[in-house]
Amino acid sequence: MSIGDSLFYYPTRSVYGRPETYGMTYSSEFFESMDGTRLHGWFLSASGGMNAIREAKGTVVHCHGNSGNISGHFELVRWLPEQGWNVFCFDYRGYGRSEGRPTRLGTIEDVQAAVYHVRNMADVDGGKIVILGQSLGGAVGIVAAALCPDVRGLAVEGAFSGYQREADFVTRQNAVLSPISGWLSRMAISEGYDPIDWVNRISPRPMLFVCGTKDTVVDHQQTVDLHDAAGGPKELCVIEDGLHADSMREVDGQRRFSEFFKMCVNGGIGV
């Protein structure tokens, strides 16, 4: 791992919120990653009574962004149980109550482990699992989806196409570092597991790519390039003047994600 790779991860152990604040039914889950690292997550049950898990439309594995932990990020997906979806929010290694230290390969293996854990849970339909990745979660979710054939579809919001490219975008916004941003990114950030090299391996499972043109965290062109490199079926939604994660907070964006997931688990072949 290069010296700058750790700059992609800003984990905390703080607690920012809890599902019970919103009256949500959930369970605290501990499971092991591919290398045995102990991870933690919250399984948010679909709303609708005692049989909600079994009767859910499907289960969404949520891969969160690069800072904080699930106690803050679950806010972005707490609307999904209200629409009939189970949601598994989990922390990568080193985040929240998960053990270890985050690494690029480690985060990818953590997503794989989360998918396997959900697939083996009682009452969960293992044939109706999809991934929703936001920012860093979109990048690692793409690679994990390529490696998990049981995943029925993938949606990403504000995902970057490559680690060096994202580092270059961030450093170019710094007046001091901008003149050497390209060189600095190549020197400080290692190569490998770039989502642009994996996204075409997910087809023929459906993919949805969402980005905003005023995203200052991830250049929206990176998400566009991921869409262009993917096989079909696929859909691209570019939100004019949209900021980072805007689509996950707004009703129209939430509806788009929910309808996309419904198509994935019901065997649709087009988007």
Image (cartoon, rainbow, N blue to C red):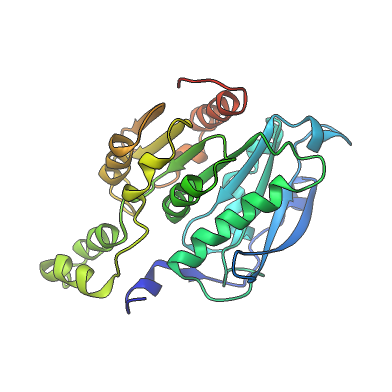
* Residue 185, horizontal then vertical, whole percent: 22, 68
Q: Is residue 68 left or right of residue 212?
A: right
Q: Position of residue 128 (x, y in %)?
A: 65, 34
Left-right relation of 242 to 170? right
- Whether residue 162 is situated above or below residue 270 in the rendered picture: below
- Asked whether 6 or 48 is in front, the reply is 6
Mark count: 0
Q: Nearer the viewer, residue 121 or 261?
A: 121
Outermost residue to the bottom: 3
* Res 223 visible: yes
Residue displayed at 71% across by 55% down: 42
Asked if residue 214 can be seen in this view, the reply is no
Quarter of the image with the N terminus is: bottom left
Residue 47 found in image quarter: top right
Answer with left or right where residue 57 lies relative to residue 77: right
Q: Residue at x 55, y 27 (%)?
A: 255
Query: Where 233 sits versus 191, above or below?
Result: above
In depth, the one of 88 and 241 nearer the eye is 88
Q: In what quadrant of the picture does the C terminus appear?
A: top left
Q: Position of residue 141 (x, y in %)?
A: 48, 50
- In the rendered image, residue 188, in percent from the top left (x then y), is placed at 26, 74
**Residue at the limit of the structure toward the right, as seen here:** 50
Picture residue at 27% right of the left edge, 63% below the top: 167
Residue drawn at point x = 40 percent, y = 29 percent:
234
